[in-house]
Image: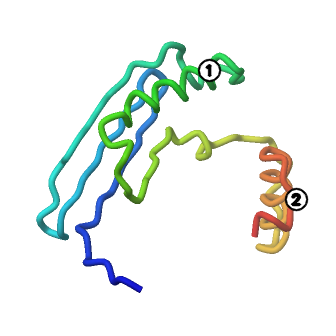
């Protein structure tokens, strides 16, 4: 078996917002990394404005294809940044706060399970 010589680590980053997709490639030894390529593509259809459909999916796929064109043939770890759609706050009325920590935890699990359509035991 032939041993490969170590290659400088390459990292590809993808960021998506409601109107653009951006892809960047950074490579080099730690402490000496440099930007190799970056591309920003405007989406044909805005995202995150409602329920996504096939047209939004196709627009996103095409934007990502265009944005990653410069480094399509390279091998790199990929990191993806998305808007904080999973982190949001919601209020709901209670007559009184549950008295024990266990009851407060159970209430939160129930509320998040309902909101995110998951089983309560999956939210520990």
Q: In which quarter of the image is the C terminus?
A: bottom right
Q: Establish if 58 lies above or below 71.
A: above
Q: Establish if 34 lies above or below 86.
A: below
**Quadrant in which residue 57 is drawn:** top right
Percent of width and height locating residue 108 = 78, 58
C-alpha gap between disc 2 and disc 1: 29 Å
Residue drawn 39% across the image and 19% down it? 42
Percent of width and height locating residue 37 = 23, 41
Scheme of colours in the image? rainbow
User: In the depicted view, which residue is nearer to us: 116 or 51?
Assistant: 51
Q: Name the residue under label 2.
A: 119
* 6 sits to left or right of 111: left
Percent of width and height locating residue 58 = 60, 22
Q: Mark 1 points at which residue?
A: 56
Q: Single out the residue that lies furthest toward the front.
A: 1
Percent of width and height locating residue 20 = 41, 25
């Amino acid at each position: 078996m032939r041993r490969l010589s170590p290659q400088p680590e390459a990292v590809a980053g993808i960021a998506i917002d409601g109107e653009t997709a951006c892809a960047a490639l950074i490579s080099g030894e730690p402490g000496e990394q440099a930007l190799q390529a970056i591309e920003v593509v405007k989406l044909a259809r805005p995202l995150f404005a409602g329920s996504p459909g096939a047209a939004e999916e196709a627009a996103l796929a095409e934007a990502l294809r265009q944005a990653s064109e410069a480094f399509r043939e390279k091998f790199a770890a990929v990191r993806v940044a998305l808007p904080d759609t999973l982190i949001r706050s919601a209020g709901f009325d209670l007559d009184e706060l549950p008295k024990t920590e266990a009851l407060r935890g159970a209430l939160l699990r129930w509320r998040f399970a309902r909101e995110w359509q998951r089983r309560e035991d999956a939210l520990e």
